[in-house]
Amino acid sequence: MAKSARQSQLDDIDETVSKNPDKLYKTQDPWGRARTGCLLHDLQAGGAKGVLGYPYGWFVNFVGGSSSGKTFVSHELVGQELQRDKRLIPKYVPTEYGDSFDTQKLYGFDASMDWEDVPKTVQEFDAFHSNFLDGVKSKSKDVPPSIVVMDSLDALRSNETVGMADERLKKFNDGKDVEDKGSYQMEKAKFLSTHYFPNMACKMRHKKSLGIIISQVRDNTDMFSFETEKRSGGRAMDFYCHTVQWLYPADKLFASGKDKKAGRSCGGIMRVKNKKSKTPRPGRIIHILFYYNFGIDDVGTSLLYLFDLLSDGGKMTKQDYPIKWEGKDTSFIKLRDEMYNDESGKMRERLDELVIEKWEKFEDASLKLTPGAGAISKYKPK
């Protein structure tokens, strides 16, 4: 009996892993892609013409500071995938003492998890993630997708660190000097790089599962580094992730001048930058519009991009913009609301077409400026 194309790809992965683990992540993905719920974000994540979203079977890392939109992006992706396939199995692991978003109201799923069940160390999360994947089917032709979100990696400790805290407390209670062992500080990174990432990445490649890791931004105290910020996970995170995206707050939005004076923002603009992407077009930057009581505004984001309504820094210089759509004068807010209320979906389809057309036009233009364009060739056939 002939093997399916998917099984042949998985067999190739097994052979690659046994011979050369470093080449594992160059093998073509057999599971399809997870969409983000935002077309512009899908284009950035896909990184190639006609490719949208993140490939299942990989890790994705969202990095950012407070209010940068990391959790919004992860929830939006899960909500979008649930709309596409109701069989999706999502697991949201709130290692930072719970999630403040009402995901049931915004996205139609419950992301809550009993605190007693939340892993507290990287070793516990490794076991949690491994057991979860073991329970996900992989041999069926039509397997249900799954997504595991860790929010965030920074909140997880190592078993050694827990032991160190207990030892320190005991010494303090006994009236002894308390000293930290420097080696303890490296145990978490060592476990991630030598055990969690390589083993879990291999498991995920055999499952239609996506792993999303959320990381907090930290000040970089390394005097020999030019980077002012860093995140936990180290080089192992960069190697095993398909995409590492850094999110920055570009602007805050206010419903009125009174709300602005009081500091009551209703949403904002997030700047999403590819720091690493295993795609032909990796270094892309986009701006995404979101509201706290709505989530990511896909239509608004597309309109802002299509009509170049944001400043170079990603700020909305006006609360509403006059624009022309299909030859008719209208405004940003009016057109956006009309597209959301269009039951036929034709206006959204047209908007998507125009956004993709503009994106690819800019990509083609930038490629023409590089060596190798046109008839130039580095290596010519003999």
Image (cartoon, rainbow, N blue to C red):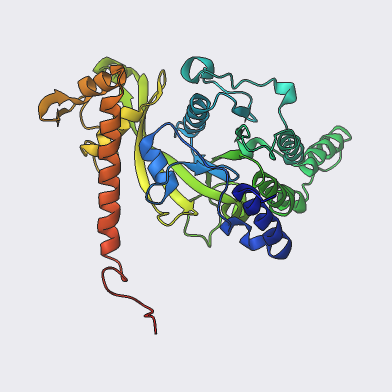
Examine the rendering and report whether any part of residue 46 can be seen: yes
- Residue that lies at the very extreme toward the bottom in this rendered image: 382
Answer left or right for 117 relative to 357. Answer: right
Answer left or right for 301 relative to 283. Answer: left
Give the residue drawn at x 71%, y 27%: 118
Give the residue drawn at x 49%, y 20%: 107
Give the residue drawn at x 42%, y 57%: 280
- Residue that lies at the very extreme toward the right in this rendered image: 174
Answer left or right for 7 relative to 162. Answer: left
How far across and how far down the image is residue 57, in percent?
60, 44
Closer to the camera, 18 or 306?
Answer: 18
Closer to the camera, 370 or 31?
Answer: 31
Examine the rendering and report whether any part of residue 271 can be seen: no
Which quadrant holds residue 120?
A: top right
How far across and how far down the image is residue 55, in percent?
53, 44
Which quadrant holds residue 109?
A: top right
Residue 291 against residue 173 in the figure, above or below: above
Quadrant housing the C terminus: bottom left
